[in-house]
Image (cartoon, coloured by chain):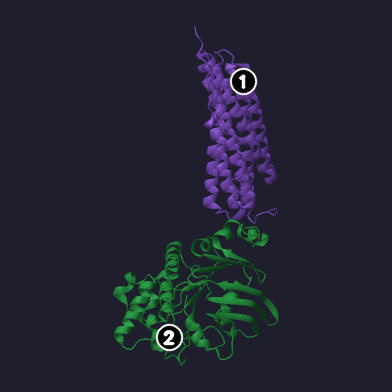
Amino acid sequence: MTLVALKPSSPNQTLDPQAETGAGAEAENESEDTPIMEPSSHHPRISVRDVNVYYAGKQALKSVDLDIPPNQVTALIGPSGCGKSTFLRCLNRMNDVIEGCQVTGQIELDGEDIYAKGMDVVSLRARVGIVFQKPNPFPKSIYDNVSYGPRIHRMARNRDEMDEIVMTSLERAGLLQEVRDRLNAPGTSLSGGQQQRLCIARAIAVAPEVILMDEPCSALDPIATAKVEELIDELRHNYTIVMVTHSMQQAARVSQTTAFFHLGDLVEKGDTERIFTNPTDDRTEAYITGRIG
Amino acid sequence: MESDHIVQSYDEELARLNNMIAEMGGLTEQQLAGAIDTLMRRDKEQAEKIISRDKKVDDYEAEIDAMTIRMLALRQPMAEDLRIVIATLKIASNLERVGDYAKNIAKRAQTLSASPIIGDATYSLARMGNIVQGMIKNVLDAYLQRDIHMAVDVRDRDEDVDRLHTSLFRELLTYMMEDPRNITPCTHLLFIAKNVERIGDHVTGIAEQIYFMVQGEMLDDERPKGDQTSFTVVEPGPAKND
């Protein structure tokens, strides 16, 4: 799982740290202006209206409307190929880099159209971080993994401030206790679950508002999964989280809002508790009870 | 949900739950009918059979408990499946209580077989028992057919049971005032009436579970209630001068 902020011209997902942290972006003001830890409000953090996505003319998402509430975990569920990952990738314009991919409609982050001309995609991806299925730390030390983004974005004026950011990020990611004594050890020396949490720490370090997670636990064992789920539950107090998961139990455990996708349609959205006890749409019922796959 | 699960054995387990409730319900209905019949016929032997057969009702409950717990752990049911499993667990518990009351009626019928007959009280009891027995039958049909209208109808019929209970309560108090020798049999009859009335309440509970299972929401609490026994006072007439 890795924080990715792709350069708009990148042909595919890259692990180049320069690209990931948006090197070269105008980031002078990041430390001052990046909003973090805003109190919950009734306004959605992200508002999606009539979004359609086409891959080489083939429609993958059909007129999706969805509000992502702040400081909550929103789970996106549905069978393979239903459009949930496509939807997730619209939220920080990751689909821009896929050739032949066309996105129409409107997506607003805090009331700002993220597909508007002049939107700085690199800083957008700092505000809307993404973490992936497989843990993917840089081949660097634990410390450098976390400090890389803040350094590129010039978020620290001196070593002390950088130490503070690194320690706070590791603490928030629930990893500090386990790595305090070996911050100079390579990130790749950690276990799978610890690597995931390192990637989450790295995502947090650039102070995003929203963290997108694409099946964050599918490569982890049950104990590591439980730790990451516990972490997600804590993180939602400070961030807004949107998570794609194939595990309905996981969606039920960690999310407050669930959206069910099927064949490119957003079939049903609502409180997680209601979706899993009394869904209104027959397709939702059939999917979550194991009648359609 | 009409269509089948991808995992066929899941469907088989849900069908098995259905069957077990049908069997357990049928047995409790039979127990109640037998207990009332025992009371009418003052048949000690039949009472004995009913008392010993209650173990079978308990065994059904234990089996359904084990099955639902297993399904919760292994299948992690969702949505309607989850409601079916939870409702079934509660319905089995209600039916077990019905079985206990029937057993208690049989025990008291044994005791009463050695007492004098008290007016028409046993006929009134039989009438109450018949209504409740019909409610059990219909509530089981409502469960198997997922029929909420039938379930609501069963719930509403409990008012008749409550009314009969209230009138029987007055009647028995009057008999006790008339002659202190009536107190023992009348007290047993009062308990039997209370047992039948409680069975009606459990059947009502089952009807409400069925509604929740099918609709996903609780039935409102606004139902007709006719039990006035808690407020009933029968004043004694003027004392007899011996």
Same chain for marks 2 and 1? no
At mark 1, the secondary structure is: helix
Residue highlighted by disc 2: A33
Residue B191 x, y percent position in the rendering: 53, 25
Position of A26 relative to B127 (above/below)? below
Residue B54 x, y percent position in the rendering: 55, 29
Gap between marks 2 and 1 measured at Cα: 84 Å
Q: Classify 10 Å Cα crowding around label 1: few (below 14), some (14-19), many (20 and above).
A: some
Give the letter of the green chain.
A
For disc 1, the chain is B
Nearest the viewer among A127 and B49 is A127
Per the rendering, the mark at residue B122 is: 1
At mark 2, the secondary structure is: helix
Residue kind at label 2, given as amino acid type: Asp
Q: Is residue B109 visible?
A: no
Residue A142 x, y percent position in the rendering: 36, 78
Could you say which quadrant of the image residue B150 lies in?
top right
Residue kind at label 1, given as amino acid type: Thr
